[in-house]
Image (cartoon, rainbow, N blue to C red):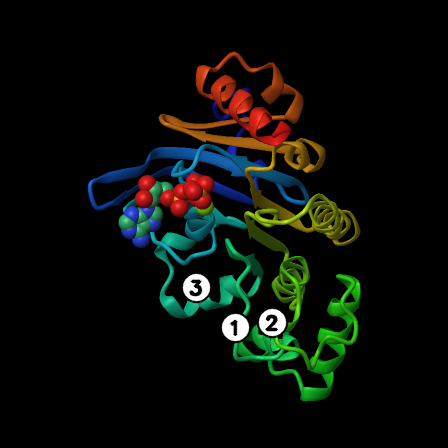
Amino acid sequence: MEQREEAAETFRIALDGVSLRRGHREVFRDLSCGFRAGEISVILGGSGAGKSTLLRVIGGLTRPDSGAVRVAGRDITRLSERDMFTVRDGIGMLFQGGALLDSLTIFDNVALPLREHTELSEREIHAAVARRLTAVGLPETEGLFPRQLSGGMNRRAALARAVVNDPEIVLCDEPFSGLDPLNVRRIESLLMDLNRRLGLTLLVTSHHLASSLRMADRIVFLRRGGALVGTPEALLRSADPEVVAFLSAESEAGSR
Ligand SMILES: Nc1ncnc2c1ncn2[C@@H]1O[C@H](COP(=O)(O)OP(=O)(O)OP(=O)(O)O)[C@@H](O)[C@H]1O
Ligand SMILES: [Mg+2]
């Protein structure tokens, strides 16, 4: 695997010299890495490596202390809150835990980004929500509440919400955690299908090694001292001690 192999222009999303502290912890120090348009990039790394933080930085929810974060050529670290809101409009997010709001129906949960970011009529919102719920295999769940669905169904509804306003970029934080193998496969094929059919640029963080290797065009491995970037094959061949330790720990966990 390589540490930064290409010019920044080839990337849809590029971090350049990003540093971020949280209390005494240096989460990123001079981190540079890029994500290409239309690709599925899977972000791997141990717990606390900064995977969720990286997605929050790219989604404009956390501002780094220094460095640039370019999304489609614009450095989002310099934008006002208002301009940031517009950028976020083009980014769908599935948060760790995939939380839907308990007090809202599935319909209202999925409709949320449309209500926040568009001027669509209720009728149009209804059509868009129904189309997405059908796409994730949850037709006719509009009137139900999250507690009435299983964990895997909730995750799929959260995915419907993440893509309901046709974003070009979708950030998925641990979309497979806590799911059984069947639901892992379901979410995996939904994500791959979205990527292939709509050309979505997908960034996925995961602890699930097998699905990461199946899905990823590119793996971004976060570790102390920066990011290693390469194909899944390059990851498996890597001699980097942190990668080797991660792979053996994850494959042990997977075989349990
Ligand atoms: N708001 C915060 N306040 C203090 N520390 C934080 C905050 N957010 C993140 N951190 C720290 O930043 C580091 C990276 O956290 P992050 O959640 O990004 O890791 P992760 O790779 O997503 O881990 P996991 O695999 O467990 O989800 C951790 O050491 C965490 O304690
Ligand atoms: Mg995380």
Mark 3 or mark 1, whichever is nearer to me:
1
Looking at the rendered structure, the kind of residue marked 1 is: Leu
Q: Residue at x 78, y 76 (%)?
A: 140
Q: Residue at x 67, y 47 (%)?
A: 180
Which of disc 2 and disc 3 is earlier in sequence? 3
Tell whether label 1 touches label 3 (CB within 8 Å). Answer: no
Residue 99 at what x, y percent from top left? 53, 63
Q: Is residue 39 above or below residue 161?
A: above
Mark 3 or mark 2, whichever is nearer to me:
2
Q: Is residue 103 above or below residue 58?
A: below
Q: CA distance from mark 3 to mark 1?
A: 23 Å
Q: Is residue 150 visible?
A: yes
Tell whether label 2 touches label 3 (CB within 8 Å). Answer: no
Looking at the rendered structure, the kind of residue marked 3 is: Met
* Residue 166, picture quadrant: bottom right
Mark 1 or mark 2, whichever is nearer to me:
2
Tell whether label 2 touches label 1 (CB within 8 Å). Answer: yes
Q: Count the marks: how many?
A: 3
Q: CA distance from mark 1 to mark 2?
A: 8 Å
Q: Residue at x 62, y 59 (%)?
A: 151
Which of disc 2 and disc 1 is earlier in sequence? 1
Instruction: Please identify the quadrant where the C terminus is shown.
Output: top right
Kindly give the residue lying farthest to the top in the view shown.
239
Residue topped by disc 2: 146
Looking at the rendered structure, the kind of residue marked 2 is: Pro
Residue 52 at what x, y percent from top left? 45, 47
Q: Nearer the viewer, residue 104 or 128?
A: 104
Residue 142 at what x, y percent from top left? 71, 78
Residue topped by disc 1: 101
Residue topped by disc 3: 84
Q: Is residue 24 left or right of residue 114?
A: left
